Amino acid sequence: MPNVIKRFQQKLPSISLSQFNFILAIWLGVVLNIGFYQQMQTLTPYTGLKTSLFIAATVVVVVALYNVLMQLLQWRWNVKLLASIFVLVGGFSAYFVNSLGVTITSDQVQNMMQTDIKEVNDLISPNFFIWLTGLVLLPILAIVLIPIRQETVKREVLKKLVNIVLSFTVMGALLFIYFVDYAAIFREHRDLKGMLSPQNTIASTFSYYHKKAPKKNLPLVLYGEDAHLIERTSTGKLPKLMVLVVGETARAESFSLNGYNKNTNPELSQQKIINFNQVSSCGTATAVSVPCMFSGMPRTDYDEQLAGHREGLLDIAQRAGYKVTWMDNNSGCKGTCTRVEKYEFPKALKQKWCDADGECFDEILVDGLKDYIARIPKDDVSPRLIVLHQMGSHGPAYFKRSPKAFQKFKPTCDSNAIQGCSSTELVNSYDNSIVYTDHVLSELMNTLKGTANYQTGLWYLSDHGESTGEHGLYLHGSPYAIAPSQQTHVPMLMWFSPEWQKNNSAQYACLIGQKSQKLSQDNLFPSLLSLLGVQTQVKNEKNDMLQQCAQSAQSRI
């Protein structure tokens, strides 16, 4: 094979190392970053010819910058390897930026590190393979085949210096001319660097390992060691059984409960629920939001490293006397359920609800809950907290998230290459997943209604929202500071059995009074502990929804 390559190379004209580096800089700077330049065009204050000149200047600046980097980094002994890596990394990141409007950040790298094979499969589509072939595999083949001319080290260094000086000169001149424009744009839109491939992935990966990668062998930090039940279960009062449903990728604006013009909540609208319509998430990705909401830290003070090795909400509830169980139909609990019981779905339920790849419809959670409750011994009066982690509306394969019986909105996008679907098809498929979530939640409530040995409650809260083409964005994971409401405005609702309402009437009335107030995932930690009757000094009273009512009542006295 090497001889075949060598014979083929002999038929091609050779180029110098500096020329090779410059050509690669053009490829990286121009071909892979069309989405970046389109975004720059929307932000420029110019119109007509001035806009074209500004974008042309931006292209030249980026190419010149990459030329400097290539001349510095790539030498005869490493050029083919490094060039292939740059094309590989840049090609993959450019696919998500240009096709889905995704901004590559350390959070996105974290999502990639914590994903599973099922989520990866959902991202692979015919469009992806076309992109992979045209902008990754063929360029790498060209890199391997292009012969680089042998020159003396002195001559190579001289050419590199000329390239670097000329590049800096051109960059300096253009940055001087457009300095005010660039300063204004990048000051207000710092996320733009996350659209520039391949530096976005390289820089974000370094940032992830420096700031976000879990540190090994860190000691467990105990938290809420004083946790205890305010009132022990007595003979005359049933123990509590609370189901916390962690939703996936559901956005509040797609719930008809919140005013959406399509009836996506036909079953929940018939249940006696408390719907909270002004709730924001802690992050725009599961890897951030789930650990954050269980950590007890407000979003503005959230420390990811500390959360990774400190006890959280589930540990505290368990210490206070609750039997805590995590039931998962997603890609794991992101470290929040490490020290509590994990429910394993029986084989019969997997055969009923899961496909050959192990991807399951969320009704497996309903049957799982029924199975769990049926196994509770008759004489067991321990209070229980059960966390159900949904597959929900996880994209881009929204068509997989709802059985045909719940695909009420047509036409649909029956592909994971969602950028190729019409807006109507895409939104219909997403809305169908919300209709199915509506059914799952309603069935969970019906299951709890039939649980006679407990006073039961259900709290549903989605981890983050989703973009379906609004503002040119798809999926989620945008930097929080610039994320659209579709990614941060999440649905939240509660349901309580008549027995729970009777025994906690003041709490129930308090919650009803807050259904239109601005809330967030910061409220989960202290408010759920209060609902469970758990007292600890680590509860942040400011974020405790029940404490707000107590303070209001006290202020009126």
Image (spheres, rainbow, N blue to C red):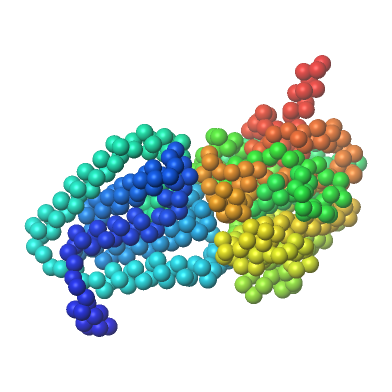
Residue 173 at x, y = what percent?
A: 25, 40
Residue 305 at x, y = what percent?
A: 49, 43
Q: Quadrant of the C terminus?
A: top right
Residue 121 at x, y = what percent?
A: 55, 67
Label total for image: 0
**Image quadrant where residue 278 sits:** top right
Q: Quadrant of the N terminus?
A: bottom left
Question: What residue appears at the point 24 percent right and 50 percent down from the top-left corner?
Answer: 68
Question: What residue appears at the point 42 percent right and 55 percent down from the top-left corner?
Answer: 34
Seen in the image, is 62 located left or right of residue 240?
Answer: left
Q: Which residue ends up furthest to the top in the rendered image?
A: 557
Front in this rendered view, residue 66 or 521: 66
Front in this rendered view, residue 507 or 64: 64
Residue 430 seen in this snapshot: no
Question: What residue appears at the point 34 percent right and 55 percent down from the top-left corner?
Answer: 29
Question: What residue appears at the point 33 percent right and 60 percent down from the top-left corner?
Answer: 27
Above or below for 557 versus 377: above
Q: Which residue ends up furthest to the front in the rendered image?
A: 48
Seen in the image, is 114 located left or right of residue 49?
Answer: right
